[in-house]
Amino acid sequence: MATIDPSWYKEQFTIGLVAAICTAASATLVQSLNIDQMLPDPNTLAASLSVFQLKQVPQRALPLAMASEQRVEGFVQELATQQTKIEANFTFNPPKLFQGKTIEEVPLKSQEKVIALTFDDGPWKDHTDSILKILQDNDVKGTFFFIGQHLQQFPEQAKRVVAAGHAVANHTWNHHYHNVDSTIAAKEIGDTNNLMYKLTGAKSKIFRPPGGVMDNGLVAYAHSQNYVVAMWSSDAREASGPTVETLVNNVVSSASPGGIVLMHDGGGDRSTTVAALPIVITQLRQQGYKFVTLPQLFTMKQQDEESFTTATPARPSTP
């Protein structure tokens, strides 16, 4: 009966298994697998496959090893490509047009009716999940401005925000309004970004100062680091304790193409916002608005500017 070299067989089985796992982007799974336990007895396998003339295996070992090496190189290259794509999807850096600037709205020269819903002070227990469900049900993507302390308290909510395809941004660690020097500002913004990346893999250079305070040192630092400081053009005014109807009117009556809507998913009881959000989405859609994230809005503006500044080629003269 033909026999098979167990070490060679194990090598080929392992390579094939790793290939399948890599294709499914589940690299962590392979670390938990016990390859030896998964392998059938090589001699039993040889007996059942004797029709394939396993006596020739040793002669084929060298070309198979070379082919295996090529396959592994291919897997590594594919994983690197996929990793680059993943990082791009979780990196929210503004185009040069917005770096170091403060914006309240981003109207497009094309006059396209797009608007960005943003949510401050999260993540938060219950309310963040409720808002995520509403956005999912209505096929809307938003932008969430995280507070570092709340990231620490509610990490799972933050992970769900990013996993659902929403954009994330920085709202400082402590949400203080008082004056800070550049060292404290760097820590407030930097610590929040670091924890956001550790928890979700997302990086962001979009910043919103707590309370919209512009002159306490935070905005100056953010500008120096090429963050875009994203304010708002439409305010739900949750702090005034509005009814659902009033909150909806606050947003819809002030909506404009390229506008940025300020709402909150954290920092307190946001049940009114949760109740009003589906109505806001419905009424804005009835007015012809499409919903985008802030990074999408920035990219659209960049493309808009480029399309309007590109000179039209002169027509050739008619002979």
Image (spheres, rainbow, N blue to C red):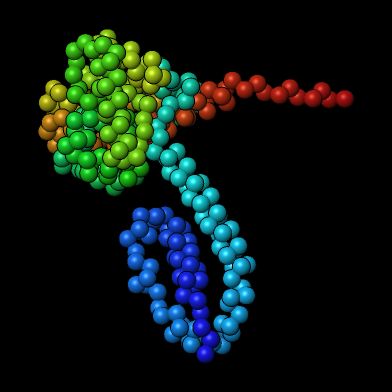
Can the viewer see residue 273 in this picture? Answer: no
Across the whole image, how many numbered discs are drawn on residues?
Answer: 0
Q: Nearer the viewer, residue 147 or 187?
A: 187
The structure residue drawn at horizontal position 41% and vertical position 80%, both measured from the top left corner, is 41
Residue 39 visible? The answer is: yes
Q: Residue at x 47, y 71 (%)?
A: 7
Taking 249 as reference, is 36 left or right?
Answer: right
Q: Nearer the viewer, residue 309 or 144?
A: 144
Whether residue 183 is situated above or below residue 279 in the rendered picture = above
Give the camera-side residue of 289 and 41.
41
Q: Is residue 125 above or below residue 253?
A: below
**Quick one: 260 or 26, which is closer to the camera?**
26
Which residue does the image show at 53% across and 57% down from the upper left? Answer: 72
- Res 141 quadrant in image: top left
Question: Taking 9 as reference, is 222 above or below it?
Answer: above
Q: Residue 263: x, y in percent?
A: 24, 29
Quarter the C terminus occupies: top right
Hey, which quadrant is residue 228 in on the image? Answer: top left
How far across and how far down the image is residue 197, in percent? 32, 36
Query: Which residue is farthest right?
Result: 319
- Image: 184 above or below 141: above
Give residue 248's position: percent from left, percent from top.
Answer: 22, 31
